[in-house]
Image (spheres, rainbow, N blue to C red):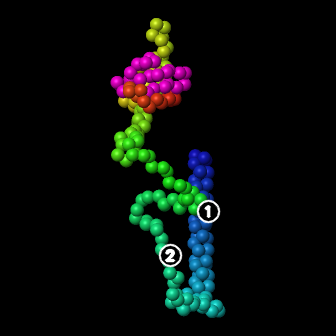
């Protein structure tokens, strides 16, 4: 019973302190607001006792300088054009034209087309498996399926395992082009 009385007294003291704080804060806000309005002065925004600021309207009416022509177009998404090469580089002699009938020359056989490099191999090397009698197998994944193979095996009918290392695997496309080293990613 005594404990409940002390808790009630402490609660009343806390409420009284909070009310006193709120009242004092509200009065301080009213005096600060009235002081700010007294400093503001007249209705036109000038402070009493001060001259209005100097506004030079003639500077607003003066002519603006002409803008320089720009090659930039904000509505096209492309990088800026590279700067022109220096004069020393531009004075290079032209390449000799091959004689008629030579490979790639006028009237001869056409020059061989440049082939694009093969696309990268989209497999991840996720580990090796070593078992007695089986040897070393590589585990590869394309994000959906897991593939296993030894050196020389074909994966997915498109890629061949060339060499299986400890931390990487060397693979190439089935036609022998585009050899690529794939690191162990786990």
Q: Residue furthest right?
A: 49
* 93 vs 173, nearest the viewer: 93
Q: Say how many tags the image has.
A: 2
- Residue 39 place in picture, x, y as percent: 62, 85
- Residue 35 place in picture, x, y as percent: 61, 82
User: Rounded to the nearest whole Å, what is the CA distance between mark 2 and mark 1?
Assistant: 69 Å
Query: Which image quarter: residue 151?
Result: top left
Dot 1: element: helix
| Proximity of marks 2 and 1: CB atoms separated by less than 8 Å | no
Disc marking residue 68 = 2
Asked if residue 41 can be seen in this view, the reply is no
N-terminal of the two: label 2 or label 1? 1
- With 24 as the anchor, is 93 left or right in this view? left
Residue positioned 48% across, 8% down in the render: 132
**Vertical arrangement, residue 99 with respect to residue 133, above or below:** below
* 138 vs 117, nearest the viewer: 117
- Residue 110 place in picture, x, y as percent: 36, 42
Residue positioned 54% across, 59% down in the render: 90
User: Where is mark 1, residue-wise?
Assistant: 17
**Vertical arrangement, residue 72 with respect to residue 185, above or below:** below
- With 174 as the anchor, is 4 left or right in this view? right
Nearest to viewer (mark 2 / mark 1): 2
- Residue 7 place in picture, x, y as percent: 59, 51
Q: Does the magenta run of residues contain 166?
A: yes
Query: Which image quarter: residue 33?
Result: bottom right
Q: Which residues are magenta?
A: 149-172
Q: Residue furthest top?
A: 133
- With 154 as the anchor, is 167 left or right in this view? right
């Amino acid at each position: 019973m005594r404990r409940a009385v002390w808790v009630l007294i402490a609660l009343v003291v806390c409420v009284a302190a909070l009310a006193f704080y709120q009242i004092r804060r509200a009065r301080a806000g009213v005096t600060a607001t009235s002081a700010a309005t007294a400093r503001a002065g007249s209705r036109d925004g000038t402070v009493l006792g001060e001259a209005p600021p100097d506004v030079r309207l003639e500077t607003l009416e003066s002519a603006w300088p002409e803008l320089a022509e720009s090659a930039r177009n904000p509505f096209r998404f492309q990088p800026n054009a590279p700067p022109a090469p220096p004069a020393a580089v531009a004075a290079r002699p032209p390449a000799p034209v091959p004689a008629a009938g030579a490979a790639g020359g006028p009237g001869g056989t056409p020059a061989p087309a440049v082939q694009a490099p093969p696309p990268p191999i989209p497999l991840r090397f996720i580990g090796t498996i070593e078992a007695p009698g089986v040897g070393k197998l590589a585990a590869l994944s394309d994000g959906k399926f897991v593939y296993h193979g030894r050196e020389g095996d074909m994966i997915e009918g498109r890629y061949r395992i060339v060499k299986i290392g400890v931390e990487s695997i060397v693979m190439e496309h089935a036609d022998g082009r585009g050899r690529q080293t794939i690191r162990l990613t786990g």
